Image: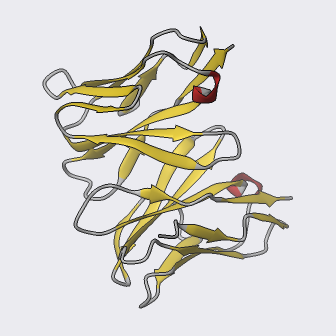
């Protein structure tokens, strides 16, 4: 079992829909990151969380440390949100090392 | 402020050759991490350098090595290339006092 599991692997939505991507992890962590990767490879860091909830524009990220679970929500989705979303954790014992989920391919159709 | 830059962006090499990739971090950032991304294994941590010292290393063979210079620029080297080394190699920098990382655009390496 991978240390970081994401679901779903693929997600297709219509423009305007509310989207949720889930991330579960099995180790104690010092931080969890949500990353966005567009075709071509560039990665953008969306959020870094160690507790609670963060919001940036239409994106919201939450984390439940006790349940070892995080969610990324996109409100009023738009075709430009189409990308791969990757969850990554920094474990308490691994220092600076990130362990990544397999990613969720999101396609938002107009 | 300029972002993280990586050179070259694309590279084609032959099995058995060696390759050196370069990463220039954001000004003021002293930590550089390297990652490999392949369709089969996803993103995997290679190593991190901070102030010219390797601080952490992933589970890769000794053919993968790196270094960091006094200006925080970093290079990674892969010797005796194998077909399986074909991947997108990403570097990311951070200030050192925070955990927030900023990624470069990556170098796409193809080994034939």
- In terms of depth relative to the viewer, which is nearer, B4 or B10? B4
| Residue B59 seen from this side | no
Q: Is residue B71 left or right of residue B21?
A: left
Residue at (43, 24) in percent of width and height:
A6
- Tell whether B99 sits left or right of A2: left
The residue located at (35%, 76%) in the rendering is B30
Q: Position of residue A42 (x, y in %)?
A: 60, 49
What residue is rendered at 79% in x and 58% in y? B110
When asked about the image quadrant of residue B77, the answer is bottom right
Q: How many marks?
A: 0
Which residue is farthest left? A66
Residue A98 location (% of width, % of height): 37, 49
Q: Position of residue A89 (x, y in %)?
A: 32, 41
Report whether B98 appears left or right of B7.
left
Name above or below for residue A41 compared with residue A57.
below
B79 to A70, vertically: above or below: below
Q: Is residue A94 above or below residue A29?
A: below
Residue B72 seen by the camera:
yes
| Residue sitting at x 56%, y 73% | B23
Q: Between residues A25 and A71, which one lies in front from this camera angle? A: A71
Image location of residue A95, percent across then percent down: 25, 58
């Amino acid at each position: 079992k991978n240390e970081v599991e994401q679901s779903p692997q693929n997600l297709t939505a219509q423009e305007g829909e509310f989207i949720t991507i889930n991330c579960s992890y099995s180790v104690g962590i010092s931080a969890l990151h949500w990353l966005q990767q567009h075709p071509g490879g560039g990665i953008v860091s969306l959020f870094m969380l160690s507790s609670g909830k963060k919001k940036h524009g239409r994106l919201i990220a939450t984390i439940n440390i006790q349940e070892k679970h995080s969610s990324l929500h996109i409100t009023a989705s738009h075709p430009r949100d189409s990308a791969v979303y990757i969850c990554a954790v920094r474990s308490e014992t691994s220092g600076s090392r990130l362990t990544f989920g397999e990613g969720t391919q999101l396609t938002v159709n107009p | 402020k300029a972002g993280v830059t990586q050179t070259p962006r694309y590279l084609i090499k032959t099995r058995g050759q060696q390759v050196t990739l370069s990463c220039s971090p954001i000004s003021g950032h002293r930590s550089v991490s390297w990652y490999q991304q392949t369709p089969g294994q996803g993103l995997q941590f290679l190593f991190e350098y901070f102030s010219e010292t390797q601080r952490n290393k992933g589970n890769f063979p000794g053919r993968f090595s790196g270094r960091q210079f006094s200006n925080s620029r970093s290079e990674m080297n892969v010797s005796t290339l194998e077909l399986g080394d074909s991947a997108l190699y990403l570097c990311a920098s951070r200030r050192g006092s925070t955990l927030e990382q900023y990624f470069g655009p990556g170098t796409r390496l193809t080994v034939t």
